[in-house]
Each structure stands twice: as C-alpha cells, then as structure tokens.
Image (cartoon, rainbow, N blue to C red):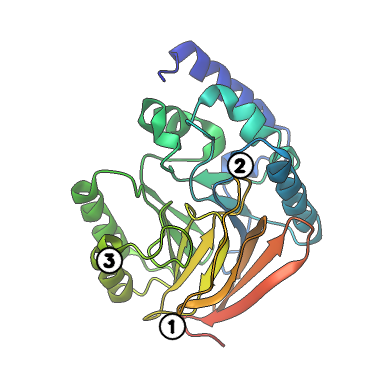
C-alpha cells in the first residue's frame, strides 16, 4: 500500500514531537559512556495487542531500574502489512514510556514490513531510526550492522563485507529479521549459513540478533558467534523444541537485555512479567565465561 507524502510528513512531525518530549537522546544519539552500552532487543513486536503492551511496560520497568541506551528492533515492526497508518497503535503507544524518556529505537525490516511500499514508509519514519534499508550504527563499544534479510543480496553483501572489514569496534553485532540457526518453526537457513557464517567468523562478529521465529532462543557460541532469536515481542507465539545448538529456548513473551563493556557482553532474557529467563556472558572472542 502506498503512503502519501502528506501522511508521511504528518507521521514524521508526530514522531519528532513524541521523541523530543524526553531527554533528546533519540535525536542526538546515545549518551552512554564510550566503553559501555546497555540495549534491549525485540522482534515480531508490532501486533498492537495486549501482549505487545505488556512487553512494552516490562521494558520500561527495566529501564527505570537499569537505564537503557537504545532498543534494537529486528523486524516485523508493524503487523500484518507494514501499514504506517498503524504506527501509533503498534509502536508509539506500546513503547510510549521509553519514547518519552528519549530512548532511541533502531529497526530493520521484516517480511511483513515490506508488504507496504517495500518498507519505504518505515525507512522514512524517524521513530525507527533507520539510515537506510541497511546501515551501520556505532554506540559505545558496539557496532551494529543492520541488514535487510529480505532482498538485494549482491549489493548488500558488498556493503556488509566492506563495513565489517573497516570496523574497529570491540563488539560487532549483525541484526537481521530472518534466523540463521533456529530450533523454531523455520529451522536453520542453509542459504544464509553458506552466505553469512564464513563472513561472521572471518570478522569476529560475536552476536547475530534476529526474529521471524516467534520465540526466544539463544544458541551456544558457534565458531565464536552466538545466535539470538527475540521473536517473542508481541505476535502470536509458536512452540519451540530445543535443538542441538540451543543453550536456552522458550516460547513466552519477552525481550532481551544486553550489556557490553570493554571485556564482556552479558545477554539476559526477561519475560513480560519481568522475570529473568536466561543469562549468559561472553568474552571478546565470543566464548562463554
């Protein structure tokens, strides 16, 4: 569905108003110390139903206790068809407390998001913090490589290879919507395994964050990379049976909280009742410590 220029302008102005009511970090960038970062990760979130709202409140509760520098959204930001007319109901209201506090969000596109104008409305929307269909984001000791797992691999791979080669960040995190390793409905993606895992290993990418499977799963480190599925953000859950690569796999609503410092990366999973489900800590080599 095509969104009019006038409607996009209205959304942009409305979003800027929401973001500016807080501490302006969403527009000015994170105020995190240069050597530390705390972020949340969610995906398959944009249902607009009670599960997304409950998750949003749990994320805000954690932020009040342990301030968050940013939120990463790994796609399917607006169900069912990426319709930007629903952005208030399926993004701004569920996360209103975080937005009012000035916490910036940065998204990638999921398969549902590209159903409307190939995701152009979401890319243009300031609240999703997207520099383009794929882009890099450096905050503190972490560099995020935000890629579009839906389309245009030849051009995108050239960008990804050069960006990873140029990065000097202590922590490298690739974010995409579709899983590479998964014990959920979609399973391992053999094409992505061949295309991406050699690149992750070559450039020391310690973490891959994705959605698409509607569950939480953390793999054990595989050749120095941990694979983290956070597709439990609001859409209808699906069952998951832990597989050989699973360190933790559960089908419950929630999100991940991650802390990076110069020497370690801590991954925690929380459910929508603010109960911790999982915790792991990695060293710079991607090994559990």
Of callouts 1 and 3, the N-terminal one? 3
Which quadrant, please, contains the C terminus?
A: bottom right
Relative to 67, 256 lies left or right: left
- Marks 2 and 1, how far apart in space? 31 Å
Image point (21%, 54%), residue name: 158
When the figure is inspected, residue 282 is found, relative to residue 91, above or below; the finding is below
* Direction left: furthest residue: 154
Residue 275 rendering spot, x and y as whole percentages:
78, 65
The residue labelled by disc 3 is 165
Q: Quadrant of the N terminus?
A: top left
Residue assigned mark 1: 285
Query: What is the distance, in whole Å, between disc 2 and disc 3 at their CAs?
Result: 28 Å
Residue 3, percent from left and from top: 44, 18
Relative image position of residue 244 (x, y in whole percent): 45, 80
Around disc 3, counting alpha carbons within 10 Å, would you say few (fewer than 14), some (14 to 19), or many (20 or more)?
Answer: few
Quadrant of residue 28 within the rendered picture: top right
**Which residue is found at the position 29% from the left and 67% from the top?**
193
Q: From what the image shows, is residue 41 above or below residue 5? A: below
Label 3's element? helix
Front residue (pair 46, 154): 46
Q: Which residue is the site of mark 2?
A: 26
- Report the residue at 40% width, 63% height from top: 187
Q: Is residue 16 visible?
A: no
Q: Position of residue 267 (x, y in %)?
A: 60, 71
Crowd band around label 2 with a 10 angstrom C-alpha radius: few (<14), some (14–19), many (20+): many
Which label's residue is closer to the chain start, 2 or 3?
Answer: 2
């Amino acid at each position: 569905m095509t969104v009019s220029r006038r409607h996009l302008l209205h959304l942009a102005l409305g979003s800027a108003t929401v973001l500016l009511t807080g501490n302006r970090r969403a527009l000015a960038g994170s105020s995190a110390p240069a050597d530390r970062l705390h972020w949340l990760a969610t995906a398959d979130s944009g249902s607009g139903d009670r599960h997304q709202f409950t998750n949003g409140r749990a994320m805000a509760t954690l932020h009040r206790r342990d301030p968050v520098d940013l939120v990463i959204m790994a796609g399917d930001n607006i169900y069912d068809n990426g319709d930007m007319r629903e952005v208030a109901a399926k993004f701004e209201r569920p996360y209103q407390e975080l937005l009012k506090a000035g916490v910036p969000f940065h998204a990638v596109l999921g398969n549902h998001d590209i159903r409307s104008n190939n995701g152009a409305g979401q890319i243009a929307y300031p609240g999703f913090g997207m520099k383009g269909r794929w882009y890099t984001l450096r905050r503190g000791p972490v560099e995020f490589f935000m890629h579009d797992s839906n389309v245009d691999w030849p051009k995108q791979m050239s960008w990804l290879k050069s960006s990873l080669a140029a990065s000097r960040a202590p922590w490298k995190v690739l974010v995409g919507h579709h899983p590479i390793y998964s014990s959920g409905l979609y399973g391992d993606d053999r094409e992505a395994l061949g295309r991406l895992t050699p690149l992750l290993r070559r450039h020391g990418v310690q973490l891959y964050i994705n959605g698409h499977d509607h569950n939480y799963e953390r793999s054990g480190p595989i050749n120095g990379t941990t694979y983290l599925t956070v597709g439990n953000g609001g859409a209808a859950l699906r069952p998951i049976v832990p597989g050989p690569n699973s360190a933790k796999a559960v089908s419950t609503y929630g999100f991940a909280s991650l802390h990076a410092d110069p020497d370690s990366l801590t991954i925690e999973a929380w459910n929508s009742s603010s109960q911790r489900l999982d915790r792991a800590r990695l060293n710079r080599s991607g090994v559990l410590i």
